[in-house]
Amino acid sequence: MLSYIIWNVHPEFIRIGAIRAAWYGLLFAFAFLAGQYILGKIFKIEGKTEDDLATFSLYVIVATVIGARLGHVLFYQPDYYFSHPIDIFKVWEGGLASHGAAIGILLAVYLFSRKYKVSYLWILDRLVIVVALGGCFIRLGNLMNSEIIGKPSNVPFAFVFANRWIDNALETYDESYQIGYKRNFTEKANFKDTTMRGVRLVPLQIHTYFDAEKVSQSEAMQFLQMNIPAIVNQNKDVSEHVVLSPKPNFSAIENNQEIEITWQAYGIPRHPSQLYESISSLLLFVFLLALYYRYKQQTPEGLIFGLFLVILFSLRFLYEFLKENQVEGENLLQQAIQLNLGQLLSIPFVLVGIWLLIRLKKLKK
């Protein structure tokens, strides 16, 4: 049995000076490439040309990015973005909504079907197969970013997302005060554990590294002893993952031009909701692809699309019970109606899917 996973993955897999590349961007790109390949195979079976595929892919890519971004802006943080309109274009800073992407794709497919005289449902039946696969990669990207986190949990496979947020906080200090910070690493420790609101916290040993050429051992030690309590207790991104030990016991070692300072804290284990959704999307992709290969050109129009809507958004509705709300405004909504925004936005998609399947059954009769 697994027993709590300490998630130490950094969002960037390449960092050489000013050159940086994030896992999220790589997985987002890979989702489109994999989707393009599979859709190409399907189009070939259906007798469509490569030009048809290229044109259709362009529609979908543009609609996905714009729809996902506008969905986040309008559904989750309209007040902020209407006050900072330039930030709407800063997609690299994060903020994409799957419901917005779904609306964008539906609109793009409609425009494509009207212009090229192709059945709307025929396209959607084929497209949602690769959309399910794309959802798998996107949620893996969220996992790499330690974002869209689950609620605290005692399940044995819970994740502790401590490292990324401590790393971000210390990088900010380094940019402002040039403290010589290099990196952070978190692992399980042996000291006595404790509980908080019924959740067993994970004892952590945190290793923080400094550049010995930029700062002395005593300066690095003094900086952490003075600032770690504020970083852990007052920084929301850190405090929802880490609780400082009553006696952090800072200790330092200097070797290989590095100063390593270790200190103790408690990690808050959480449901790896990104992983739940990623695995579900992968299984949905396999199911829909197998269903398509069973019927191929004789696939009843609306069958695959209807199943996709019902399964994906029903699961999304259920997973939201295990996830933290993404923005503060959702807390008020949830207090009022016991549902968050993600659940409310999922309901119409599920209803449309049910309607399509009922319609299909009547047509068959």
Image (spheres, rainbow, N blue to C red):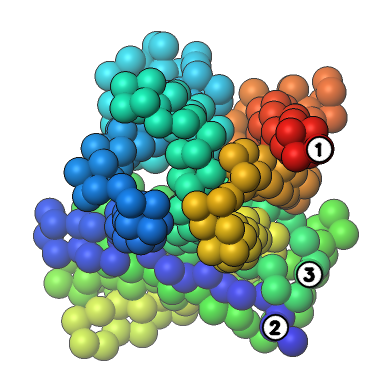
Which residue sits at x=69%, y=68%?
A: 158
Give the residue type that dot 2 points to.
Leu
Which residue sits at x=40%, y=80%?
A: 252
In front: 315, or 332?
A: 315
Disc 3 is placed on an element classified as loop
User: Which mark sits nearer the N-terminus, 1 or 2?
Assistant: 2
Disc 2 is placed on an element classified as loop
User: Which mark sits nearer the N-terminus, 1 or 3?
Assistant: 3
- Residue 150, placed above or below residue 212: above
Q: Is residue 187 left or right of residue 197?
A: left
Which residue sits at x=26%, y=88%?
A: 255
Percent position (x, y) of residue 324?
68, 44
**Residues marked 1 and 2 touching at CB (< 8 Å):** no
Disc 1 is placed on an element classified as loop
Disc 3: CA contacts within 10 A as few (<14), some (14-19) or many (>=20): some
Residue furthest front as drawn? 365
Q: Please identify, in this view, whether the residue under mark 1 or under mark 2 is nearer the observer.
A: 1
- State how far apart marks 3 and 2 are (Cα): 9 Å
Give the residue type that dot 3 points to.
Val
Dividing the picture into quadrants, the one containing residue 352 is top right
Query: Which disc, if any, is residue 365?
Result: 1
- Residue 15, placed above or below residue 313: below
| On-image quarter of the N terminus | bottom right
Determine which residue is flagged by label 3: 155
Percent position (x, y) of residue 153?
77, 61
Determine which residue is flagged by label 2: 2
User: Which mark sits nearer the N-terminus, 3 or 2?
Assistant: 2
| On-image quarter of the C terminus | top right
Percent position (x, y) of residue 49?
24, 48
- Residue 243, placed above or below residue 156: above
- State how far apart marks 1 and 2 are (Cα): 50 Å
